[in-house]
Image: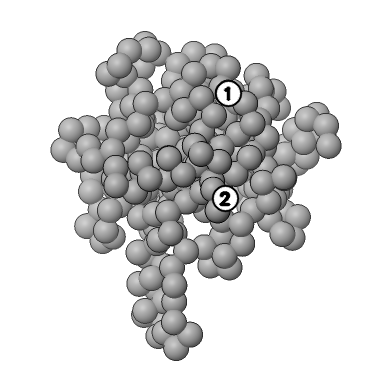
Amino acid sequence: MSIYRWLVGLAAAIALSTAAAAEDDQQKPAPLIAGNPAVAPLKWVGLLVFKNAKGDTFSCTAQFIAPKVLLTAAHCVRDNTTGEWYDTDKMFFFLQYQNNNASDVYKVICTGHLTGWVPTIAANATDDEKEAAADNAFQYDYAMILVNHESITGQFKVETDWLGKHPMATQIGYPGAIAGGMIVQRDPGMLALSLSRSNEIILMHGNRNMTQGTSGGAWIANFDTTESPSENVIVGLTSFGNDTWPGITFGPYLRQEGYGGLFDYVSKGCPK
């Protein structure tokens, strides 16, 4: 399939998947906080497009963390309730995506996530036990993707085990509720440790429109167009939001023990 057809199909899919959200927000114009994908750090970001077994098209946000490795949410590569891996032959990454244009398009070689993302649940488990297992899995909701050629713009730095060092971060992504998911957005907020789930952090940004499409989008400490060692450090990523707390996003706390092993595994081609 041509890249043009993929982009046209993507636009249609995003429009359909966000129609309900757009209808809800008709009386509340979405704030535009567009980022500039031509400069750092958003030049390392793009749109990840994939299909499930039924043929439905979805999109997430992803970003380069190494010349050929992307970071995104685990639920963007595998459904942890059914166990379905999304087909890498039908998964593409559009770097610097903006209004159906991209500077480069990448095919996916392989994907990987931490084992905790797909919990083992006993057949006779109670509803409470199933709910607890599902809640526990969100601390593992990040994945890495190996693509077929190197980034043409560079990559982010990632910091693990940073708790207590960074009070704020900027969330990025392609939310369908803002500009139809066609333009990368940025939204700063305060970081805090979740008290309800293990190894989970929250970003309090106050923008209820940063919803579908932002999954996998990085939380960036010291967001700046300057490219220096202390700027633009990924400290987390978007896992999910909750209608009960609009304007708050939840994400996994990146610990080196798990993060480093996953990076090595994917960098080596996801060996069996």
Q: Position of residue 76 (x, y in %)?
A: 55, 49
- Whether residue 131 is visible, yes or no, is yes
On screen, residue 148 above or below 58:
above
Q: Residue at x 64, y 53 (%)?
A: 86
Q: What element carries label 2?
A: loop
Q: Mark 1 points at which residue?
A: 150
Please state if 117 lies on the left or on the right of 6 as rendered: left
On screen, residue 2 above or below 201:
above
Q: Where is residue 207 in the image (x, y as percent from the top left)?
A: 41, 39
In the rendered structure, which amino acid carries the disc numbered 1? Glu
Q: Nearer the viewer, residue 10 or 104?
A: 104
Which numbered dot is residue 77? 2
Dot 1 alpha-carbon crowd within 10 angstroms: few under 14, some 14 to 19, many 20 or more: some
Dot 2 alpha-carbon crowd within 10 angstroms: few under 14, some 14 to 19, many 20 or more: many
Q: How many labels does the image show?
A: 2
Q: Where is residue 21 in the image (x, y as percent from the top left)?
A: 59, 49
Residue farthest to the bottom? 124
* Disc with the residue nearer the chain's start (2 vs 1): 2
